[in-house]
Amino acid sequence: MRAAEELAKRQRENPLGPDGDRVLKLFRSLPPLSDPEFEQVRVSPNLAVGEMNFRQPNAKAFHFPDGSHLITIFSGLVDFYSSACQILMEAGSFHNEKGESEGRSLEDLLTDLKELFLTWTPQGIQENRPSEKKLSTVNADRMASATLLLEGALRFILCHELGHVLFYKPSGSEKLSTGLTREQETISDIAGMQTALMSTPTLGAIRMNLAGCVISLRVLAVFATTGHTFTGDHPDPLNRVNEIFAALRPFCTSPGQYWTVSPIAYAFDEALETAGQRAIGGPDMLPIRADRAFSRLCAALEEVVKERQRKTIIVPLMAREFAEATDEQMAEIAMYAAQVFAQDSPARREPGQRWTERGDMFLSLYHQWPARAIEYFDYAISKRKQAGA
Amino acid sequence: MAITGCRNDALTVLMNSLGYQPLVLAKTGLKAPFLYNYKDTKLEPIGPLSDFLVPGTVQPENDLGSVPEIARKETDKKSGSAIASFLGDALKVVGITSAPKLESSLSHGTDFVFSFDDVTSEGLTYSKTAKLLHSIDRDALSDLPPGALEGGYIQIAYEFLYAGSLGMRATSGTSASFDAKAIQVNGLLDIGANGKIEATSGTSLSFKAASAQRAAFACKIGWLERVGESLKLHIHEDAGESFLADEAGPQPYLLERGVVIRAEGA
């Protein structure tokens, strides 16, 4: 099979590092895919998958005349994701009023991520800066989480690349157009996301896998601003990030499930976007986004009901967003809150997600929210009651 | 395994960067364009492209040129048994086919580097070769190894490199007793009757063949794909589908980077 021969040749030309073929190892751990067409590609004997030792953070699909296909992720992309995941996992889950947590400070985290992006510019790669960059050692627990996150990111990329095999149409003409349509790219991304969500029954791992999908695309979106050249046949990575979040909503059975599986994805996505913006000399803070603000609120409430944080973190944590959000954003946040926190919310009946306690906690803080926020919450909750009646 | 010698030798890397695949060929006198079957790192000669053209096709004269970028560029240091092995292959390139006999004292403790001189190219350009493919005799294609064309294993070497002489130099910092002139005079190195050795300096030897029959030592190569009713020659490495563009741009197609490929039957 040409694909396997090509992979072997490239691996002889550029031998892999001491960890061997990390991509093949991960591919072999992929669970059966829910989409039968994608699953058929995954198990195809005509498919070869492996790592290629190139510094560029890239992934490729090759198609051969004997009908075989090769999916490869470059070592540069694995290494970049690995570094980013370690940095992200060094952060504590929440920071107190002084920006402190059991992990590193948020500012340190953003600085490290910014430096990482600056190290991995095309020029930095050419100057071999990535191999000179050493990360601080993280403890075993955090390393295990970083590995889960990394696997989530790579699994997503692999599933996306399966789409490049599935939708490949050999052309009979001289001009071979093998690129996917925009719709096919999106289908491939969604298949990757669904695989991430369905590959484990554990909530923690589902969250980490989803975060992996999102960060894999957010990293590409930042690369698009730090000098990397994207091919014309892939959609804008920023749109792909947004589409993943949009596709997640209908995939989840309820708003409660959506906000349960997505907090790490939202938090890491925001951290990477902020760091990327700083890397190109942009402002230190991102504009407010309603979904990120609400995700942060949900995650903070969860930490408190699980007694991992004190209740006093919540109101200060949301102060900026509740004060500065536009009217539309406040209305959106309030709508989300009504969906999961209101007394009659179906989310409260969903087992294992602690929406009842989170909702009660949210309502118990009601008098502490800014008057403007209360107004929006009251309106959204009353509207919800009317709709229910 | 048809890959021979050390990986990423300096001369191999240089040739690769210029788009050439270093080779050890079985025969002298082969002319480009020449067809090979390359599968599982085995390079099997098939025959000249002219054998597969519609009878009467006028094939253009091969272009001739010199390649100063490669001439006198040295390999990495060779030591021990690698000296005789490399020398044997390299002598064939300049037309000296008998296996060299080295006095063991010659290579003991001395490292050598090799280089090719008077390097010339002969073959067709990509465009001329591609144009010839329009005159392929479809019936003749059935003589190709079964499945080889469909699998993309058929290669066309469309330009060969030849060398007029081979240089061998004892590197500095090695045995002080090495004396190129003494080797020439005392016959410590025997290359048979069809070659001659000349000491070009106190530490350097040059080898030339008595006859002009040389073997190519590198080629520019592409692979053939059947696209509909036509054949397409690919001379660039497949870039694949990716989200990032290749920053180095299109790379020349090679059988394998960093190595010398020994053709079957060599």
Image: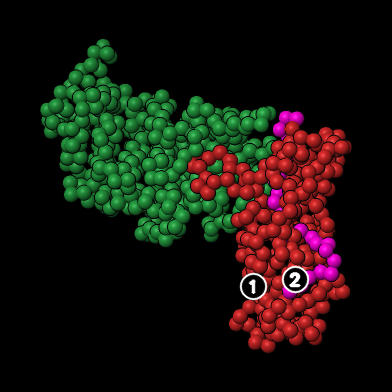
Horizontal side of residue B87 vs B211, given as left or right: left
The circle on residue A186 is none
Amino acid type at mark 1: Lys
Instruction: Work out whether residue A374 can be spotted.
Output: yes
**Region of the chain picked out in magenta, as a range:** B206-229
Question: Residue B109, image x and y in percent?
Answer: 67, 82
Q: Nearer the viewer, residue A4 or B47?
A: B47
Residue at the (53%, 49%) spot, across then down? B248
Amino acid type at mark 2: Leu
- Mark toward the start of the polypeptide (2 vs 1): 1
Chain shown in red: B
Q: Is residue B220 magenta?
A: yes
Q: Does residue A169 sit above or below B221 in this rendering?
A: above
Instruction: Work out whether residue A215 can be spotted.
Output: no
Q: Does residue B193 sit above or below B229 in this rendering?
A: below
Q: Is residue B215 magenta?
A: yes
Q: Chain of mark 1?
A: B
Callout 1 secondary element:
loop
Residue at the (70%, 46%) spot, across then down? B125
Q: What is the crowding at mark 2: few (fewer than 14 residues within 10 Å), some, or many (at least 20)? A: many
Horizontal side of residue B198 vs B79, given as left or right: right
Indicate the quadrant containing the N terminus of chain B: top left, top right, bottom left or bottom right.
bottom right
- Report which residue position mark 2 lands on: B87
Chain shown in green: A
Q: Chain of mark 2?
A: B
Residue at the (46%, 55%) spot, across then down? A126
Q: What is the crowding at mark 1: few (fewer than 14 residues within 10 Å), some, or many (at least 20)? A: some
- Outermost residue to the bottom: B177
- Report which residue position mark 1 lands on: B77
- Residue B2, image quadrant: bottom right
Question: Residue A65, image x and y in percent?
Answer: 69, 37
Residue at the (18%, 37%) spot, across then down? A320
